[in-house]
Image (cartoon, rainbow, N blue to C red):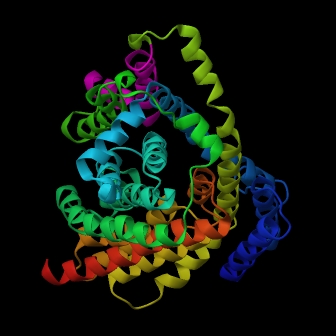
Amino acid sequence: MGMVIVIAAIVILLLLITVAKLHPFVALILTAVGVGLAMGMPLIAPSDEVPGIIDSIKAGLGNTLGFLAIVLALGTMLGKMMAESGGAERIAKTLIQRFGQKRVHWAMMVVAFLVGIPVFFQVGFVLLVPLVFTIAMETGISLITVGVPLVAGLSVVHGLVPPHPAAMAAVGIFQADVGLTILYSFIVGLPTAIIAGPLFGKWIGARLHKKVPDEMAEQLVLHHEAKELPSFANTLFTILLPVLLMLMASIANVAFDQETEAAKVIRFIGDPIVALLIATVYSFFSLGYARGWKRDKVLKLANDCLGPVANILLVIGAGGAFNKVLLDSGIGTQIAEAAQHSHISPLLLGWGIAALIRIATGSATVSMMTAAGIVAPIASSIPGTNMELLVLATGAGSLILSHVNDSGFWMIKEYFGMTVKETLMTWTALETIISVVALGLLALLNLIV
């Protein structure tokens, strides 16, 4: 019953946006209310333990934006500083020179894979998207050809590679070895990112030519004389500063006694929000004041760049509200229970349960955590199960078929200026390729190890 309601909700949502021409924010909130009613959720919470429809919508929107609003705001300011100073153009020109125009999409995949290791998907995306826009404008290549490798690299790392929170938590639930999991994640992740990124990106980019949206080009892409551009090293350090701080926090989590003051301080400055705050303030100096800018100019740039983000935040927040109603209504639990009684191999079971919950609820993290909790006791009772590969199979399943109930879907759609149909053709297809290719490679690796 739950799956039928999910499918009906997705169809109605698509019709509201494409046929009725409703703003996605309004359409998502209306559909969330409809799902809650169809699943018999109370209109108003009768108690603290049982959420009502409106409570779920408010909690989902608030929880999603509580983290993302700060990340997108700081990331956009950092991106604006890179654009106005010429930093993004300097990195883009250097990548084009080193890799050549025909191979620049490979460079984006490599950069995204490396940057994505210690950072959240959304953080990596807002850090690197100005580069994508600048490269697309500089070369005339379709935004899709350059953008797909970026999101492929970030998505693979987000779903498969510890120390990302969901992958790290799954390692704990399955009692897997962290070092082996990371090793296997690289063996599986790199070829997966290549297939879903540069290869698929070039194929779909040739069929779907998109230019950088005007308002994004205005905010995050500017052209300068070569003599005005900041140095490559300075710009690269500025963009990698939050990555380095987050990487330090990940190392501190493993290497230090968690009760020491040093570990607490490192974990604090390595939190994604604090790391981005430090990097953004640093960019005001490294790309602004140090190059002769006045304080008024930096303040004006920080103010001006936030306008276009408001619409993106609203749509992402509404996606989070829809996601929360799906979770609170019990749809994810229904699907998980049905899958639990099937008799298939643990790898396929972990991937399948995570995939079903992902399709139903839209959350990669929730689907990975839920699937891990269900499959762990089953897998531990089956001799010979490779727990490290099971972590990766569950992560791969949690990435499949991102669509209208995923806030990431709306972020990619809005930033790249695509229609819902074009986002399904690119982002949804890319996520599904990652999930299926990773499962295939894991099955091969399972034969060896």
15 vs 367, left or right, is right
Q: Which of the pair 127/288 is nearer the observer? A: 288
- Quarter of the figure with residue 286: top left
Q: Is residue 139 left or right of residue 186?
A: right
Mark yes or no: residue 391 visible: no
Observer-nearest residue: 430 or 325? 430
Residue at far bottom of view = 343
Q: Where residue 367 sits: x, y (%)?
A: 50, 66
Determine the residue positioned at 33% across, 65% down.
Answer: 193
Q: Position of residue 45 (x, y in %)?
A: 80, 53
Q: Is residue 29 magenta?
A: no
x, y percentage for residue 35? 77, 68
Across and down, in percent, residue 40 comes to 80, 70
Residue at position x 45%, y 16% in the image: 288
Q: Quadrant of residue 227?
A: top left
256 to the left or right of 412: left
Can residue 50 be seen in this snapshot? yes
Q: Which residues are magenta?
A: 260-288
Q: Quadrant of the C terminus?
A: bottom left
Horizontal side of residue 221 vs 22, given as left or right: left
Task: Locate the N terminus by quadrant.
Answer: bottom right
Dominant secondary structure of the magenta stretch? Answer: helix
Q: Is residue 384 above or below residue 228?
A: below
Above or below for 185 versus 203: above
Q: Is residue 276 magenta?
A: yes
Residue at screen point 38% across, 69% down? 196
Above or below residue 2? Residue 314 is above
